[in-house]
Amino acid sequence: MVNVIGLGYIGLPTALMLAAHGVDVIGTDYNAALVDTLNSGKTTFQEDGLEELFLKALKTGIKFTVEYQVTDTYIVSVPTPYDKFSKKVDPVYVVSAVKEILKVAPKGATVVIESTISPGTIEKVVRPEIENAGCVIGEDINLVHAPERIIPGNMIYELLHNNRTIGADNRMIGEKIKELYSSFCQGEIVVTDIKTAEMTKVVENTFRAVNIAFANELAKICRHDNMDVYEVIRICNMHPRVNILQPGPGVGGHCISVDPWFLVGDYPSLAKVIDESMKTNDEMPEFVLNRIYEIMKERNMTDISRVGLYGLTYKENVDDMRESPTLQLLESQARHLAKGLKVYDPYITDDVVANQYHDLDEFLSAVDFVVVMVKHNEIMEKAEKLAGKTVLDCHNIIHQSGVYHI
C-alpha cells in the first residue's frame, strides 16, 4: 500500500493515477475539510480529465484520511515555498511530513519526496531529521526523490506520458520505486542519485524562466523605442536555430515563478543570470500597470473603476491562482495607494478579490478598458464582445484594430 501525503495540485492527481492503475492507495492531508470533500465524492479543483480519473480511483478503492498510515511506501507531495528575503527553499512542510511518517513507518519503509526542493535539501535537512529520530538510513528508512513533471491544464496527460527522474541512495530501491511509477507512467524513467534528481527539476524550471525573461525584456526594449515586439520575434523565429518565446504580463504558478529562486538563494554569487531573469519576470505586473496608466492618459481616461482585468489565474483554462500576475498587479496597485480595478475570471467562482465579477457580460458592461491578463479560451472565442472597448492585450491574442500591447 502507498500512503500519499499531501492532496493538493500534485499529490491528488498522483494518488488517483496510482489507484486507477491498480495500486492500493490511501491519501493523507492535514486539511480535514479537504479530506471530507474528497470522501464525499467531490474533487477539490478543476482539471481536464480529473473527474473521470477520480471516479475510476474511487471504484478501485482509494481512501482519504487525515491519519498517516503504517505501510512500506510513502510519497510526500507537500508545498515547498521559498523565503522571499533569502530566496532559499522553505522545507517546513516536507520536514513536518517526514516527522509524522517516522512515528508510524515500519522498519525498511521507503519515503519518496515528490515536492520540488533545491539541490542538497535532502542531505542538509531531511537526513538529519531521520537520523535524529534514531533511524539508520538504508536500513530503517530508505530515501528517494522523485520530482513531479506536470503542469496544471494538462496534468493527466503529462502524468501518463512525461519522462520522470528517480533519485535514490540505493539502486535497488530506486528500481523498486521506478516500478511503482511504471504502473502508470509511459515515459522513460531514469534512476540517478538524489542530488542530481533535485538539481534537474530545479534546472528544468529555471531554463524556462530564463527564456521567458528574455522575451519579457525584449518587450520592454521594443516598448521603449516604439517597435513591435511580436513582429521582431516572428521574424527572428524564422531562423532555424532561434525559438524566442512570447512575452506576457508576468509569471505565476509554483514552478517557474518560485523554483529558480532556490538556486539564487543557495548560490547567490554564481546564479547571476538566473537572478536577473527572475527580477525581470517579477517586474512585469508593474510594467503592465504602468502601461494601463499610459494608455489611460493617452485616451484621456480618468476613472480607474472603469478599467477591468480579465483573468485571475496564473495560466489559461485552469483555476490555479498561485503567484498569479493579476494578483501581483493588484498588490502593486495597492502599494501605489490606488484601487478600483475590476476583475473577472470564468474559472474563479468564489470572491477572492475586491470588485470581482462572475459573469463576462456584466463585467464588460461595467468597464470601458479591458486588460487581457490571461488567455482563457473564453476570451478568444468571444473576442467580438470587446468591440468598442479600449483593450490592452498582454498575450497578442485579440486581433482587432486599435488594440494596445505590452
Image (cartoon, grey):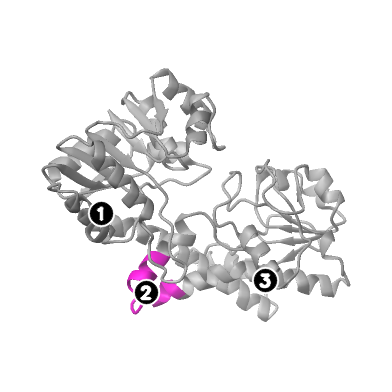
Of the residues tagged 1 and 2, which is closer to the observer? 1
Residue 342 among those drawn in magenta:
no
**From the viewer's perspective, is 238 left or right of 288?**
left
| Residue found farthest to the bottom | 225
Stretch of the chain drawn in magenta: 261-275
Whether residue 277 appears in this view of the structure is yes
x and y percentages locating residue 129 in the rendered image: 23, 53
Picture quadrant of residue 65: top left
Residue depicted at x 55% and y 61%: 251
Instruction: Please give the residue where the numbered disc 1 appears in the rendered image.
Output: 126
Q: Is residue 57 above or below residue 320?
A: above
Secondary structure of the residue carrying tag 2 is loop
- Label 1 neighbour load within 10 Å: few <14, some 14-19, many 20+: some
Residue depicted at x 23% and y 46%: 144
Instruction: Please give the residue where the numbered disc 3 appears in the rendered image.
Output: 335
The mark total stands at: 3
Instruction: Please give the residue where the numbered disc 2 appears in the rendered image.
Output: 271
